[in-house]
Amino acid sequence: MTDTDPLFASSGDLIADRRYRWALDLAARGDCAGAADILAQAVALAPAFAAAWAALGALRDQLGDRSGALAAFAAARDCDPDDYHGARLQLARLGAEEATRQMTDAYVRRLFDQYAARYDTALTEQLAYRGPELLRTAVSRVMAAAGRTMRFASVLDLGCGTGLCGASFRQYADWLAGVDLSPAMIEQAAAKGSYDRLAVGEIETFLADEAAHAQKYDLVLAADVFVYLNDLAPTLAAIARVLAPSGIVAFTVERNPGDGVKLLPTLRYAHADAYLRQTLEAAGLAVSHLAAASARSEKGIPVDGLVVVAQPAPIHSRACGNPVPE
């Protein structure tokens, strides 16, 4: 599984749908030019067929036809105001729209709803996913350095998905909560039985509600979640409001070796080291650990990433605006 695999939604025209399936089969066998021709026929039959337009854009991009790809992605965008197929992200990647456009909830929710049943297998067998293990090791090191026991009264797993991270931290948590935008992913997580509470919802909205009810967490986790967010400032600020005074937030990201935030060809965001430090500091959080780490592989090659652990900064450091040393 990759985040750029095609998502299917019927055009309502049986012949167009069949041509779409036929085109994907041709593409899987390496005939991208033939697949693009078939998709062009599909959209001629069903001009509002967003899935076919998006797939056509991807194939034209692979074939080096940038102008054709832009036209196809623009058509997909116009047919699909919720950006279910990520057409606006593709346009941003190709430089035709804002470079770090935020993903829509509809795109992320439907992406993971479609993958939920095979998500664990795809991550562990195809992508060598190791995000929970990286977080567990990083948090353990920070706790040990502070002379603290690896035990938390309350843990929150943001973007919990099918519960892989929750299962990894269950033994250290007296109470474990998880939230995810995808109902199908939450259903998979519930079946594992690791969580005391599960909720379907958007992360910032969930955190705002928790803060309004004065809910505090000793550990907040986000494994392979922030790759779907461009601007982390609102989310990190919201996390800071629900952290206990001695609480910890730990997360993984893909690393941008340049500055700021970059939208990758995989339609995932990469964040720079300096951006993370600045954004955490602005949220009143001090970095305790920031290290290079790869949470997953693509085509057998480890993806450049970072694992980060942060804690509420001392009050005097926030007031003076001084950086807190690791």
Image (tube, rainbow, N blue to C red):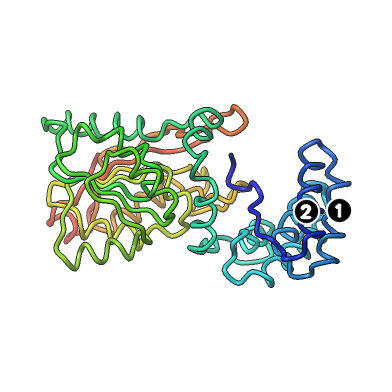
Q: Position of residue 150 (x, y in %)?
A: 16, 32
Indicate the amino acid at tag 2.
Tyr
- At numbered mark 1, what does the secondary structure look like: helix, strand or loop? helix
Work out whether residue 86 or residue 97 is closer to the camera in this orientation and state it.
Answer: 86
> Pointer 2: what residue?
20
- Residue 142, relative to residue 273: is it above or below? above
Assess whether mark 1 and mark 2 are in contact (beta carbons under 8 angstroms): yes
Q: Position of residue 163 (x, y in %)?
A: 36, 41
- Residue 324, relative to residue 97: is it above or below? above
Q: Position of residue 267 (x, y in %)?
A: 58, 51
Q: Please tell me which of labels 2 and 1 falls first in the chain.
A: 2
Quarter of the image where the N terminus is located: top right
Image side of residue 108 versus residue 199, left or right: right
Work out whether residue 50 or residue 184 is closer to the camera in this orientation and state it.
Answer: 184
Residue positioned 14% across, 35% down in the render: 151
Residue positioned 49% across, 45% down in the render: 116
Q: Which mark is residue 38?
A: 1
Q: Position of residue 189 (x, y in %)?
A: 36, 43
Residue positioned 63% across, 64% down in the render: 88
